[in-house]
Every structure is written in C-alpha cells, then in structure tokens.
Image (cartoon, grey):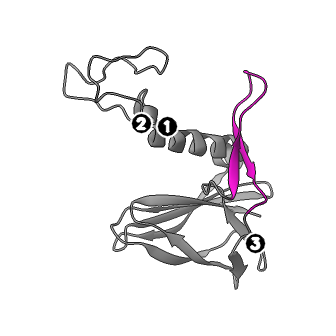
Amino acid sequence: MVYYGDEVGMYGADDPSDRKPMIWADLPPNDDPNERIERDVLDHYRRVIAIRNSYPCLQTGAFRTLESRDDMGIYAFCRSLNDESVVVVFNNSDKAHRLDLPSPWADGTRVDRADDSKAFEIVEPKDAAMRATVRPTGKHKSSLKVEQGRLHGCMIEPRSSAVFVKS
C-alpha cells in the first residue's frame, strides 16, 4: 500500500499532522527546505509500479510463498497467471544473501532482474491514459539460470528486494 507522499519521500508526524500537504514539483519553494522530493525514492516507486504494470500476474496471479527465513530476514514469493510467473524476494536484514530458490520455471530457463535499471528500462506511455511499463534493454545478459528446479545464485543486498522474470 502506498499512501500519498510516500513516492516522493514525504514523512508524517503524530496527530494532528499525520500527513502534510503533498509536495508538488511544479509548486516550489516549500516552507521547509528539508521537505523536498527525494528523487531516488520517486525513481524507485516509478520502477516498481512500471514492473507491476508490465506483468499481469503481479496484479491478479496466484500467490505462492517460495521461501520464508526469519533467521535471515528473507521472504520470497511467486505470482503466476497462465504461463507467466514473477518471483519477488525481500531481504530485511543487514547482510547480503546469495539464495537458491525454488523456481516456477523449467530447468535451463534464463532469468533476469526486472528491478535492475541496466537490464530493464522504463517505457513512458505516449498516451496519457496508458501506464508506464518496463522492457529489457538488451544491454545486459542474464547470469541466472534454473537448474534442478531451483534459481541459483540470487544475490540480494541488505534491506533491499529483487524482482525476477523469465528472460
């Protein structure tokens, strides 16, 4: 769930100031110079929303937990619809983890990270009624491959996530 302002790095306070008025890029300056659009936060939200728009299974697909490791701060799930599957992994720990996860794809399948800006670019729609999506850049070769029913070598940095899709 995204509350308004989260996508630009706004923060709230206690009642009665739970949420301040939205920070709009075209209406500066703000009263407090520390209240500004956090570009990296906005870029992150734009990317994950574009990923969701690109894969219908993330919106309506069947949900299955792949890995849940409280001791490592790891949670991974898969969403599948028809022949499309996406794997999402969260690392809520202070340590990087290299994981071998159960795979929804057949052995030999190459897998990419849709959240990697080198591998996938955001495509802005030409029509205002459409939504942004992602597409492979063609500049990045996948190093992940499904073997023995598992996705091997998924590197997840601390306090981060990854979105894996079939190449």
Compared with residue 23, is residue 99 higher up or lower down, i.e. above or below? below
Task: Read off the residue under disc 2.
Answer: 38
| Residue at the limit of the structure toward the bottom, as seen here | 148
Give the crowd class for mark 2: few <14, some 14-19, many >=20 residues within 10 Å. few
Give the crowd class for mark 1: few <14, some 14-19, many >=20 residues within 10 Å. some
Numbered label tally:
3
| Residue found 45% across the figure and 59% down from its top | 160
Q: Is residue 10 magenta?
A: no
Left or right: where does residue 161 sit relative to residue 142? left
Rounded to the nearest angstrom, the CA distance separating label 2 from label 1 is 6 Å
Residues marked 1 and 3 touching at CB (< 8 Å): no
Asked which quadrant contains residue 37, the reply is top left
Rounded to the nearest angstrom, the CA distance separating label 1 from label 3 is 30 Å
Residue toward you, 86 or 122: 122
Could you tell me the amino acid type at mark 1?
Leu
Residues marked 2 and 1 touching at CB (< 8 Å): yes
Asked which quadrant contains residue 163, the reply is bottom right
Task: Read off the residue under disc 1.
Answer: 42
Rounded to the nearest angstrom, the CA distance separating label 2 from label 3 is 34 Å
| Residue found 75% across the figure and 30% down from its top | 125
Could you tell me the amino acid type at mark 3?
Arg
Percent across and percent down for residue 59 are 65, 43
Q: Secondary structure at mark 1?
A: helix
Asked which quadrant contains residue 126, the reply is top right
Q: Secondary structure at mark 3?
A: strand
Task: Read off the residue under disc 3.
Answer: 110
Point out the stretch of residues depicted in magenta.
Answer: 119-139
| Residue found 79% across the figure and 54% down from its top | 82
Q: Secondary structure at mark 2?
A: loop
Compared with residue 114, is residue 143 higher up or lower down, i.e. above or below? below
